Image (cartoon, rainbow, N blue to C red):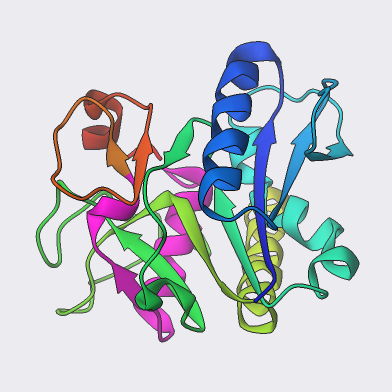
Amino acid sequence: MKIAFVTACVGPKHIENVRKLFISIRSFYPETDLFVFSDLIFHYGVVVVPVHYVPNPLPALLRYHYMMSIEKSLVHYDHVFWIDADSEIKQRFGPEAFEDVVVVDHPWFDLSSGPFEKNPRSMAYVEKPVDNVRYVQGNFHGGRTMHYLKLCDLLMRNTETDLMARIIPVWYDESHLNWYAQNFPVTQLHPGYAYPFEIVLPYPKIISHHNAHDRVKGFG
């Protein structure tokens, strides 16, 4: 099984985090590639995809554009995952992570709650959450390559529609991802696949170095 991870490091803030992420990936998946969208230079085995510096929140909002820009490279992999630069893998994934499209439940919100986009003019608008679908995080998601790239293509086009209307959803790419999860079949992974580092979890798959306060606000 050939796997690609993709992340972004625009500006120097997360340059050390990318090194830790790369080491953690190679510890559990030695044959895996890590693509890094960045305006920086890395002196180890990541695949750097050059991008120009853009201010926040554009690096997050353009996430699906980034993915589709390397579509021709990604189609050679069986599975593709987006993973935020400030993440570290702590265990090999379970079989549940290798379904068609996978997303991660947010640890702070119950069913039908969460900071969904409320602007009805936005393509990310969620009028009423589906009863059995939780609010999901934006810091880890992926799936079987062709299924996941279809998600990225659709959300890229939705993002472009919003930008042309001068609309930025409340949580950027995460808002668009939650719209998708509310409207299309996804496999929802437990929060251990993207858990704040300062909270102890018995069996975390991935930890995130965002602090818990940011995650309560919906960031990620």
Looking at the image, which residue is at 53% across and 65% down?
123
Residue 74: image quadrant is: bottom right
Q: Residue 208, percent across and down?
A: 37, 35
Relative to 48, 12 lies left or right = left
| Horizontal arrangement in the rendering, residue 18 relative to residue 36 (left or right) | left
Does the magenta-highlighted stretch encompass residue 167? no
Q: Magenta segment, which residues? A: 169-194
Q: Residue at x 27, y 42 (%)?
A: 195
Verify whether residue 172 appears in magenta: yes
Q: From the image, which quarter does the C terminus lie in?
A: top left
Image location of residue 21, percent across then percent down: 55, 35
Q: Quadrant of the N terminus?
A: bottom right
Give residue 187's position: percent from left, percent from top: 36, 78
Give the answer, above or below, for where 51 lies relative to 144. Answer: above
Residue 69 x/y as whole percent: 85, 57
From where the camera sits, is residue 180 visible?
yes
Front one among 143 and 173:
143
Residue at x-position 36% and y-position 27%: 210
Q: Residue furthest top?
A: 12
- Outermost residue toward the left? 110
| Front residue of this view, candidates 56 and 197 | 197
Q: In the image shown, does 177 or 169 lie closer to the viewer?
A: 177
User: Looking at the picture, does residue 90 appear above or below residue 213?
Assistant: below
Q: Residue 157 lies in what quarter of the image?
A: bottom right
Q: Residue at x 83, y 74 (%)?
A: 76
Q: How many marks?
A: 0
| Whether residue 125 is visible | no
In the rendered view, does 70 fall on the left or right side of 207? right
